[in-house]
Image (cartoon, rainbow, N blue to C red):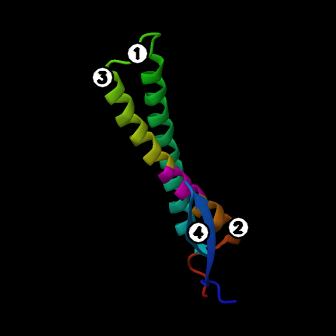
């Protein structure tokens, strides 16, 4: 099997089956994947914390239209950041499964 062979992986997210291509990577590519994963985790945590703060403002009374709108916008941002985090997570796990070789190694 050549080192750079693409292998398909099918994953289910939000009720949809998606194909994530698995490509063996070198050390530089693996490090870049890891940085993107860590960054997307930080963004997801920040968006989730903001949503948590907004939900903490809820009282026994029905939500005002303004707060309801803020929550809806933040929920959308949190959902998007979670999808990005999950995508980077899946790609990093796939790369870790194959491992990596030094970038100066011949294929």
Q: Earlier in the sequence, mark 2 or mark 1?
A: 1
Q: Are marks 4 and 3 in contact (CB under 8 Å)?
A: no
Res 100 quadrant in image: bottom right
Q: Residue at x 60, y 83 (%)?
A: 4
- Measured Cα–Cα span from mark 1 to mark 3: 9 Å
Q: Are marks 3 and 2 in contact (CB under 8 Å)?
A: no
SS for callout 3: helix
Asked if residue 41 lies in the magenta stretch, the reply is: no
The residue wearing badge 1 is 62
Q: In front of the other: label 4 or label 2? A: 2
Asked if residue 87 lies in the magenta stretch, the reply is: yes
Res 54 quadrant in image: top left
On the image, the x and y values in percent for residue 62 come to: 40, 15
What number is the disc on residue 27?
A: 4
49 up-or-down from 22: above or below: above
* Majority secondary structure of magenta residues: helix
- Measured Cα–Cα span from mark 3 to mark 2: 48 Å
Q: Are marks 1 and 4 in contact (CB under 8 Å)?
A: no
Q: Are marks 4 and 2 in contact (CB under 8 Å)?
A: no
- State left or right for residue 103 relative to residue 101: left
The residue wearing badge 3 is 65
Q: In front of the other: label 4 or label 3? A: 3
On the image, the x and y values in percent for residue 24 come to: 61, 76
> What residue span does the magenta drawing correspond to?
83-89
């Amino acid at each position: 099997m050549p080192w750079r062979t693409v292998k398909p992986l099918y994953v289910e997210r939000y009720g949809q089956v998606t194909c994530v291509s698995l490509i063996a990577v070198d050390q530089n590519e693996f490090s870049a994947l890891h940085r993107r994963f860590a960054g997307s985790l930080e963004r997801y945590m920040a968006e989730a914390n903001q949503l948590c703060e907004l939900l903490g403002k809820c009282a026994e009374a029905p939500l005002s239209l303004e707060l309801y709108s803020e929550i809806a916008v933040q929920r959308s941002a949190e959902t998007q950041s979670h999808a990005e985090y999950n995508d980077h997570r899946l790609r990093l796990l796939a790369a870790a499964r194959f491992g990596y070789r030094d970038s100066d190694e011949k294929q």
